[in-house]
């Protein structure tokens, strides 16, 4: 237990970094996912295919590859290093967040899409017969029902994202997993560290789970 | 393009070999996970509280803890655990577990947790009449689980098993931290040697995309083939 207690301040600091990465990427990913889900149900072919291929590529490749392309790959391009983007892209912190947000955005867009698509036809017809136009129908019927139906699946995605942030440790960031690896490789106590850090992760998972259950309960009105 | 060619000047043949390694690890991990889940599912379905607890603990831990942490546990702790067991049997030399085994076991444990949930869900969704019918025919529990329930469970869980497979395939990229030369590791080596990370990581992404697309097509075909009731 001693190595863990000695490194406790570092562990706490890295736990905060993990929370930070998770929350920021989930929020950005939520926005991206929402926009791309709207594009996916739109009638404009270009937007549809853009969204389709975005989610195809980001869901078909490992997050590990994505974060490496953004962190190591983009740095290779001359024009990126000279552009204003470089201020953001030279920092592993932002590279990690960009990769996480794009990744979770792809999954989120699929979750919302299936939520929007599964709306009962009768409801849409009823709205139509009440004289609501398309936009209004979307706003008062498709959107609230779709979002509500997406909550359980979105909860799983949040937990996957929490686990995904462990990849930040591969681009030099000291998040919980990075710190765990550091302690293991200096003190050689893998089981102890796994149990301790693993419990912290499980606690976070539990928090997300409780939050999602609360949301589900709150929005269950029929 | 020359960098991706086959032969001495390019990395094509190395990457091809790495792709086979990725497929091999993914299959090993998925199979191992399936094997574990077939042991854990009965625990989760049993009436005993203790067995339930063991099953739930397993799935909670391996679905809630990041893959990398599990890999580090087995990577750093695996050989000492094996040596500890070996010592009991009187073997005192240093034993090193190879990266392939570490990788497929750690990813397999995670894959197994997801497979367990999938199979459990499928068993629960089977009509109670099937169980009653099998019992009324006088079949033993082991017999009807194997010949009546299992085939239906496999068919019902195919779409979700496909998801677990995709997850497992993508998780194998993480094994590269143990030094096993699969797609990700090979791209790392190649981009280090040629100072061209963008090309090699994009190509790695392309390879993964091919693998996931092909396997998705295959699973869809299977689903269609076995979807004869609905």
Image (cartoon, rainbow, N blue to C red):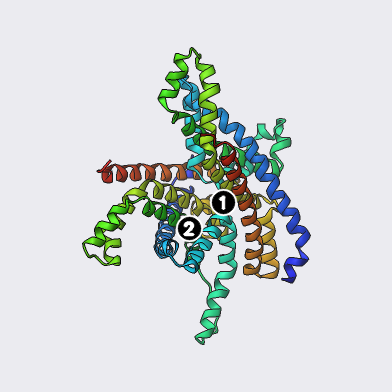
Residue B113, labelled with which disc?
Answer: 2
**Helix, strand or loop at mark 1:** helix
Q: Gap in Å between the C-alphas at discs 1 and 2?
A: 30 Å
Residue A13 visible in rendering: yes
Residue at image location 26% in from the left, 65% down from the top: B143
Label 1 close to label 2 by CB (< 8 Å)? no
In this image, A175 relative to B211: left or right?
right
Crowdedness of circle 2 by 10 Å Cα count: few (<14), some, many (20+)?
many
Question: Which corner quadrant of the image does residue B230 belong to?
Answer: top left
- The location of residue A117, given as percent across then percent down, is 45, 29
- Tell me: residue A169, above or below residue A185: above
Q: Nearer the viewer, residue B218 or A222?
A: A222
- Residue placed under numbered mark 1 in the picture: B188
**Helix, strand or loop at mark 2:** helix
Q: Nearer the viewer, residue B12 or A23?
A: A23
Residue at image location 48% in from the left, 44% down from the top: B4
């Amino acid at each position: 237990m001693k190595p863990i207690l000695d490194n406790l301040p570092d562990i706490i600091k890295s736990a905060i970094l993990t929370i930070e990465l998770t929350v920021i990427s989930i929020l950005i990913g939520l926005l991206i996912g929402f926009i791309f889900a709207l594009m996916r149900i739109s009638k404009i072919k270009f937007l549809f295919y853009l969204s389709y291929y975005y989610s195809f590529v980001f869901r078909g490749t490992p997050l590990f590859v994505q974060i490496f392309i953004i962190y190591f790959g983009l740095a290779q391009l001359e024009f990126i290093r000279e552009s204003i983007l470089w201020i953001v892209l030279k920092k592993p912190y932002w590279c990690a967040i960009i990769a996480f947000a794009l990744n979770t955005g792809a999954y989120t867009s699929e979750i919302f899409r299936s939520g929007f698509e599964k709306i009962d036809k009768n409801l849409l017809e009823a709205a139509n017969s009440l004289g609501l136009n398309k936009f209004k129908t979307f706003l008062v019927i498709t959107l609230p029902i779709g979002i509500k139906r997406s909550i359980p699946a979105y909860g799983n995605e949040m937990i996957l994202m929490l686990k995904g942030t462990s990849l930040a440790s591969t681009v030099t960031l000291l998040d919980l997993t990075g710190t765990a690896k550091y302690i293991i490789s200096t003190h050689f106590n893998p089981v102890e560290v796994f149990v301790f850090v693993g419990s912290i992760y499980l606690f976070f998972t539990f928090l997300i789970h409780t939050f999602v259950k609360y949301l589900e309960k709150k929005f269950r009105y029929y | 393009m020359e960098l991706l060619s086959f032969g001495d000047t390019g990395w094509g043949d190395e990457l091809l070999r790495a792709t086979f390694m990725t497929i091999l690890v993914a299959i090993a991990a998925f199979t191992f996970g399936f094997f574990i889940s077939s042991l854990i599912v009965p625990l989760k379905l049993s009436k005993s509280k203790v067995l339930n607890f063991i099953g739930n603990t397993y799935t909670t831990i391996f679905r809630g803890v990041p893959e990398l942490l599990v890999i580090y546990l087995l990577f750093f702790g695996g050989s000492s655990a094996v040596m500890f067991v070996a010592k009991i049997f009187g073997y005192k030399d240093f034993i090193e577990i190879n990266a392939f085994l570490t990788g497929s076991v750690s990813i397999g444990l995670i894959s197994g947790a997801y497979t367990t949930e999938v199979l459990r869900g499928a068993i629960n969704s089977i009509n109670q009449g099937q169980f009653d019918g099998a019992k009324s025919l006088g079949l033993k529990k082991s017999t009807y689980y194997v010949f009546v329930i299992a085939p239906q469970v496999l068919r019902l869980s195919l779409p979700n098993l496909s998801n677990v497979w995709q997850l497992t395939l993508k998780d194998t990229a993480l094994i590269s931290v143990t030094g096993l030369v699969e797609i990700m590791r090979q791209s790392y080596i190649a981009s280090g040697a040629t100072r061209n990370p963008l090309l090699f990581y994009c190509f790695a992404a392309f390879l993964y995309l091919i693998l996931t697309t092909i396997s998705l097509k295959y699973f869809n075909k299977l689903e269609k083939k076995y979807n004869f009731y609905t």
